[in-house]
Amino acid sequence: MAGLREVHLYYDGKPQPATSATTFQSIDPATEEPLATIHPASNSDVDAAIASAHAAFPAWSTTPPLTRARILLNAVQLLRDRNDALARQETYDTGKPFSETSTVDVVTGADVLEYFAHLVASGGLNGETTQLREDAWVYTTKAPLGVCAGIGAWNYPLQIALWKSAPCLAAGNCMVYKPSEFTPLHASALAEIYAEAGLPPGVFNVVQGAGDVGAYLTAHERIAKVSFTGQVSTGAKVAASAAGGMKYVTMELGGKSPLLVLPDADLDAAVDGAMMANFFSSGQVCTNGTRVFVPQDRLREFERRLLEKLKHVRAGDPLDENTNFGPLVSKVHYDKVAAYIRHGVEVDRAQLLVGSADAPPPANLPARVQRGYWISPVVFTNCTDTMRVVREEIFGPVMTILGYDDLPSAIARANNTSYGLAAGVFTRDVNAAHKVVAQLEAGITWVNTWGESPAEMSVGGWKRSGVGVENGRRGLDAWVRNKSTLVEMGGVVPTVFAKI
């Protein structure tokens, strides 16, 4: 379409034309209007981006951590200075309300970059020293891995790009990053910010494209590590491919997380938590607590308060700062979520508290956004554990409520899933909270809140929900390899091959 922005690749410190013959469009989910024409990478383009990263690696990996940190902190300031412009671009690309992208997406991404910059500047890459005996000691050092691949997701594009690139670059690695084909616009903007901050050419590179580009990138023999965020089925394929090349991996995958309301919980707080765990970002959050367990004798009151608070969901033009609920990210995803809702009604026979089988859009949408991929919040209640809408990740604004009679059985039911990404507990009894959290099989847990994931907090899934962690101190260790050295100073080499 004439007049659309053209998005190519970025490597060797500058935009680069793609050599593939095809293009695709980035679509505004709120209006179904095209935003840009995207030029995906060919295999030779990916090769060139990786070669650029390898050329940059020797100098960047030996740059002192403090110097690397100063460059990354320059980028932090640029991100914060341009917060609103970047957030507005994220809103166009994802459909998420500006009230969210301007206060969460850019902000939390910049926080993580700042955290890792300060961590490496203050000794976060230091090793350990152990005195074995008077004349022998062991020391360890941490070395960067090399050129790494980052595969982004479409729900938090810029934030996820920063969660991957921040520890990668801080540790002295170089990255080739592929954004989701559904939300590609942030990647070149981030590359340009890094370059303006002083990052040398080739340290951060961008290739555009769909799954075929990601598959070629992650299987490439010159890639040392793959960091992937996305659904379990794709993550399993990426991990298998990486394992074949003995690559390091970090996998942040999906979930069907339980939220347990204990018998003594403050129901208003629990309902607030459940709404954040299901309807924030229109339910497109991997850690969402979509299985809400409520004591049977408090179920009706929980439902009553939930219905009251649902009145505060404000769908509308995502650029309107009063809007707090947006469309789904794409037509493909809209069709998937709508099919789950129909299945819940027609096959699972789940009881609808809110919503309907035809997944209608919210009422009274402004004319500008009426063609978007809208689905109103849906709440199924009196659900059973065997229902498909309870067992499978929907990734949309769909809550399932499950009553329980006793806490031990609720905990067992909460753990009866192949996922293990997140879980949460609402209670006035802090001792009880700790006891329940200790029994929940999930890598991320919350008590009397839901969803916050600060830079200092290492996060990662159990079971099929992931491998490794992101953020926190452990998040840096995921981007280095350890070297142990034993030094003998006694002047004599112990040997069994001595003269008798």
Image (tube, rainbow, N blue to C red):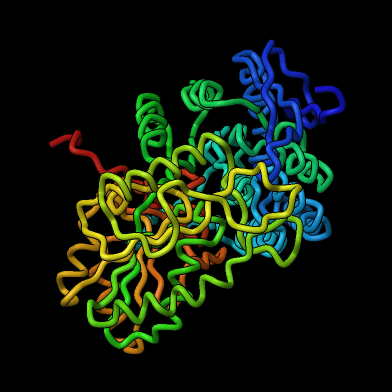
**Which of the image's four quarters has the N terminus?**
top right
Residue nearest the viewer, comparing 142 with 205 = 205
Residue nearest the viewer, comparing 133 with 350 = 350
**Left or right relative to 414: residue 150:** right
Quadrant of the rendered structure where residue 60 is?
top right
**Left or right relative to 258: residue 33:** right
Q: Is residue 20 above or below residue 371?
A: above
User: Percent x, y for residue 83?
Assistant: 78, 58
User: Percent x, y for residue 162?
Assistant: 63, 49
Q: Residue at x 84, y 44 (%)?
A: 196
Q: Residue at x 58, y 72 (%)?
A: 312
Quadrant of the rendered structure where residue 347 is?
top left
Q: Residue furthest left?
A: 500
Q: Residue at x 64, y 53 (%)?
A: 96
**Which of the image's four quarters has the C terminus?**
top left
**Left or right relative to 481: residue 294:** left
Q: Is residue 48 above or below residue 426?
A: above
User: Percent x, y for residue 475?
Assistant: 49, 55
Residue nearest the viewer, comparing 413 with 9 = 413
